[in-house]
Amino acid sequence: MNARTYLDHNATSPVRPEAREALLAALDATGNGSSVHAEGRASRGVMDVARARVAALVGANPAGVIFTSSGTEADALALTPDYRRGETPIRCDVLLVSAVEHAAVLRGHRFPTDRVEVLPVDARGRVKLDALDAALERHSAAGRRVLLSLMVANNETGVIQPLAEAARRAHAHGALVHTDAVQAAGRIPLSLPLLGADMMSVSAHKLGGAPGAAALILADPDLRPAPLIGGGEQERGRRAGSENVPAIAAFGAAALRAADCVEADGTRINGLRERLEDALRCEFPELVLLVGDVDRLPNTSCLALPGVPAETVVIALDLAGVAASAGAACSSGKVAASHVLGAMGVSERIARSAIRLSFGWSSGEEDVDRALGVFRRVLPGLLRRRAAA
Ligand code: PLP
């Protein structure tokens, strides 16, 4: 079989060997983490280790980690109007989100739609802080408490948001702050205390864990979002249902490994991405690099061949052995232009041509070489077809 080049880590990353090992070991063990017997205690022990590792990845308190089944579920758990801190209820009246949030935030929240306000972003996809200030002032003058949800980094472009500054401004108005760190966790160093958010979503399958585990991490374990799923007292009554111990064990192993090598991998992966982007820019001046000169994740490249539909490029690359994606994985297969690029003011023609290449922990120089070889084979034909159309 010809070797394939996987450049879609933002959709899902391959399972790291350490995570696979932890997953298989936990699969071989019996025991529900809620049971009092030895087998149950062993499963609970496995989860406690994973909880500490996931918390350590973002410098948080393990007691603040609520395991969920997916990043989508973690976002939905956080984005509720109803909170408690200890015994005191906290009611959020309005949800503020940036226009470039993932669908899990834009469509997964639990607010009535007339209580959601979408904040504009600038041409590079960063939330406009003056629009945030204006919204915060307007809502606090009307006596409304805000819940702000602003991602650390975007899944389509990799652009990093000014989260610490936004959180500082939001807190000055008594708001709660959630951040979706699903793409950033394990790819750049993250500190929940330094970012200043009240809670953060992370997902195992983006950082080399297995699908089926994710977490909402609370900076203050006494802050409790209204549960999304009622039932048993798992996760301290914050998320009912027997935990997915094997996936959680793998999540912990992946988080530990990611934390150990996040700096070194970030530098290495940034080098791979830069080499690919530089070569493509030089050899194919028709390619547009959609975000370059801005703080962004080291692994993500967003490119467009204007006038050639993204699906056409993705299929041609796939047939030639490169896995890439057209915008967000969740919207691939659909012809709709990306809401992220639309919010940045990118023209519809270019947005419909945008493809995403994303590197990760398993990527190496050979992936850049093979991807370049494939681009050299595939792009001239696509450009000829574009000229003939
Ligand atoms: N948030 C962001 C920024 C994402 O990129 C994704 C998935 O692509 C999600 C949330 C949803 O995560 P999951 O696939 O674990 O549900």
Image (spheres, rainbow, N blue to C red):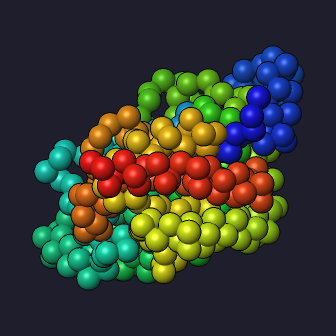
| Residue sitting at x 45%, y 61% | 303
| Residue sitting at x 44%, y 76% | 162
Q: Is residue 219 left or right of residue 208?
A: left
Instruction: Determine whether 155 is above or below 313 in the image.
Output: below
- Foreground residue among 324 and 224: 324
Quarter of the image holding residue 261? bottom right
Residue 189 visible? The answer is: no
Q: Quadrant of the N terminus?
A: top right
Residue 141: x %, y % from top left? 15, 76
Residue 385 visible? The answer is: yes
Q: Is residue 8 left or right of residue 22?
A: left
Residue 321: x %, y % from top left? 63, 39
Residue 38: x %, y % from top left? 86, 22
| Residue sitting at x 36%, y 47% | 385
Residue 128: x %, y % from top left? 30, 77
Instruction: Determine whether 345 is above or below 94 in the image.
Output: below
- Foreground residue among 252 and 309: 309
